[in-house]
Image (spheres, coloured by chain):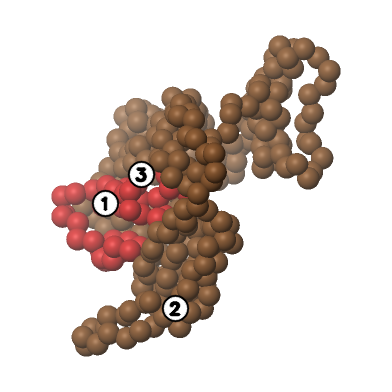
Amino acid sequence: MKPHLLLKGDVDVPADRDRREVFAEWLTADDNPSSPARR
Amino acid sequence: MVLAHFTDGSIRDVTPITVYSSSAPNQSATWGDNGVVEKVARGETAILARYLDKMATSYITFLEDVPGFAWNNAPERISSTRSSMPSSSSCRFLPSDLCSDEEFLRRRMSTRRAGCPPSKNRRPIWRPRTRTSADQFGRCARRIRRLRLVLDADDRRYSAVERQKLNPTGVQKFRLWLYESVRSDKPLNQFARELLTASGSAYANPAANYWRASRDPQDATETTAQLFLGIRIQCAKCHNHPFERWTQDNYYGIGAAFVRIGRKAGSTADEEVVFVSKRVKSPSRAPASR
């Protein structure tokens, strides 16, 4: 199963990449209303 | 207006059957079932529209002229104020002045003991007595230090003994890393990235202890959602909540980001190494559907 993130949908992650990095990028993105820095 | 784009190419107006929520309910804006947002006061708000498992967010700023308003160029003392300054300025909100030592300690003690800042309508939990300011500060600092030692002991007990997930060395190193992160005013985004992508020896890289405590994708999903998203996502493990925006897809979709975390023994006793594994630890999806 691919990571499925709010407002972004399914995310393709290369096999050699850490999936947690993708999640962390989504979490801390400026346009993510759920970002901890926005709350 | 909310338009739904379906896979057959059709587009329908689903405004009346969309669920709306706001980041600041009734503070800056109210909204009706027809999707109309009305201003309550000046400020910013994010309106989230949810239709089935799809969501979209609109950011709305309500401006209002405040006679005599002049921005005071308040210094940014901590990083978290940096992002709020432009919106405070455009919405005509002046930052508060620095509080006194007494007020700081009163808030600090109240947060420690009651879990929330002091309220004007409640009896103060801690009130400074008639001593000099230096005496009060030193006395209260000692109290906080004692309280912190008690909390440290509690944490160690709960984490190391009851939960059986981290050993005392891991707890100590992890807590020290947390303290240092707060003390150095590490930006929250940087803190989140360092914690969530931590790998290597849990002793050499204390942030990796997070992945020793969250040992499977579901545990990691629930802990991470509560810690960084401020939500309890457990209900979405089995079904979509009718009023919450988080769905089963979100639950298992977040879990999919944590399925390749491996753990192996380190070079010293009780040490564990966190690494990105080629094997996938699949989160078993609950049979119930939306």
Residue labelled with disc 2: B18
Residue denoted by label 3: B196
Task: Report the chain shown in red.
Answer: A
Q: CA distance from mark 2 to mark 3?
A: 34 Å
Q: Is residue B215 left or right of residue B274?
A: right
Mark 1 crowd level (few <14, some 14–19, many ≥20, 10 Å Cα) = some
Closest to the observer: B17 or B138? B17
Local packing at callout 3 (Cα closer than 10 Å; few below 14, some 14-19, many 20+) is: many
Expressed as whole percent of the image width and height from the top left, the position of residue A38 reads 43, 48
In the image shown, does B220 or B137 lie closer to the viewer? B137
Q: Are marks 3 and 1 on the same chain?
A: no
Q: Which residue is mark 1?
A: A22
- Rendering quarter of residue B138: top right
Q: Identify the residue at image location x=47%, y=56%.
A: B62
Question: Does B230 appear above or below B193?
Answer: below
Q: Amino acid at mark 3?
A: Leu
Tell me where residue B264 appears, x and y as whole percent.
32, 41
Label located before the other in sequence (2 or 3): 2
Q: Amino acid at mark 2?
A: Thr
Q: Is residue B67 above or below residue B101?
A: below
Which amino acid type is marked by label 1? Val
Tell me which residue sits at (47%, 73%) in the image: B36
Can the viewer see residue B214 in this picture? Answer: no
Say if labels 1 and 2 share a chain: no
Chain of the residue under label 3: B
Give the residue displayed 79% in from the left and 28% down from the top: B127
Q: Nearer the viewer, residue B106 or B199?
A: B106
Q: Residues within 10 Å of mark 2 (few under 14, many from 20)?
A: many
